[in-house]
Image (cartoon, rainbow, N blue to C red):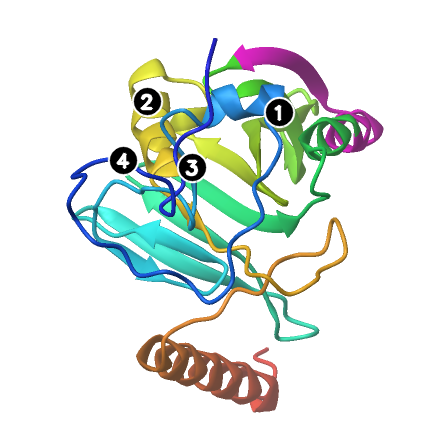
Amino acid sequence: MFGRRRKKSEKGGAADTPEVVPESTPVEEPDKPEDQYRAEGPWDASEKVPEVARIDLGAIRVPVEQGLEVQVNVAQRTNQIIGVTLIHGNSALQVQPFAAPKSSGLWGEMRDELREQVVSQGGKVEDFDGPFGQELRAIVPVEGKTNEDGHQLGQRVRFIGVDGPRWVLRGVIRGEAAAKPEAMAAVEAIFQQIVVVRGDHPVPPRELLEITVPPEIKQSMEQQQRAAQAQQNGQAGQPDQD
C-alpha cells in the first residue's frame, strides 16, 4: 500500500530544524488511488522535492541537464504558451499542466478523449499499464506521408499522465522513447523530476495552468520570431523564377 508523501509543512527529517510557518496553511488533499503513481514523481511544489537543477517556468519546473533541450511551445494564432517540450537524444516529451478538481483526477477522462481522437484519425491505440499507471500507446497517422504502396504511414506515440493535488500533468512521448525500452526509461526519469506549481488561485478544471518563461528566454524567443517573420516576408516579396 502506498502512502502520500509528506508535505513540507509536515514533521520529518531533522527534528530540531526550525521551519518557517506559512501565512496560510495548505489544505490537505484526500488520499487518492492515483497517488501511488507519484511515489517517485512528478511532484507537487508543496512536497519535499529531490534537489536537481530545474528551470522555473511558472506552473512547472522542469529539469535542466547536459543533453536535454528545453523548448517552449507557442500557439501561432494566439501567441500563448501551450506546453513545454523536452528533447533527449532522439526522443521528445511534451508536457502540459492542467487544473483538476480537488477530490478526483482527470487523467482517466483525458485518456478516453485521446483514444477517441486517435481512432477518429484512423490510428490505432491500446491501453497499457505503465510506470505512471494507465497510459495509451498509439500509432498516429502522419499527414501527407505514405509508403510506396500508398498506405498511410504512422508515428508511434505514448500518452502518459498523472493526477496530483488539484492538477494533472499530461505528457506526449514521440521518437525512440515511444518504442525502445532504454529510451523509455530515460524519458520517464525526466518526467518524474518535473515539479508542478498549482498555486492557490482558483482555476477551472481542465484549464491549462499558466506557463511563463524567464525574461532572457522570452527575449530570445521574440528575436527568433522576428527573424522568422522577416525571412517569411522576404520570401513572399521575391519574384517567381521561371
User: Residue 169: percent from the left, percent from the top?
Assistant: 55, 41
In the image, which is nearer the foreground, mark 4 or mark 3?
4
Q: Tag 1, which secondary structure?
A: loop
Label 4 vs label 3: CA separation? 20 Å
Residue at x 26%, y 47% (from the top left corner): 68
Residue identifier under label 4 = 12
Can you identify the residue that label 2 sits on?
A: 185
Q: Nearer the viewer, residue 146 or 157?
A: 157
Work out which residue is located at the far front of the displayed protein and give it: 16
Q: Earlier in the sequence, mark 4 or mark 3?
A: 4
Q: Are marks 4 and 2 in contact (CB under 8 Å)?
A: no
Question: Element type at marker 3?
Answer: loop
The residue that appears at 35% across and 32% down in the rendered structure is 187
Q: Position of residue 100 (x, y in %)?
A: 69, 45
Identity, as a three-letter code, of the amino acid under mark 2 = Ala
What amino acid is found at the position of numbered circle 3 in the picture? Pro
Please tell me whether residue 61 is drawn above or below residue 154 in the rendered image: below
Q: Quadrant of residue 90?
A: top left
**Of label 1 and label 3, which has the lower sequence position?**
1
Give the residues in magenta: 113-129
In front: label 4 or label 2: 4
Q: Which mark is residue 32?
A: 1
Q: Is residue 6 above or below residue 230?
A: above
Q: What's the residue at 59%, 77% (across, down)? A: 242
- Numbered mark located on residue 194 in the image: none
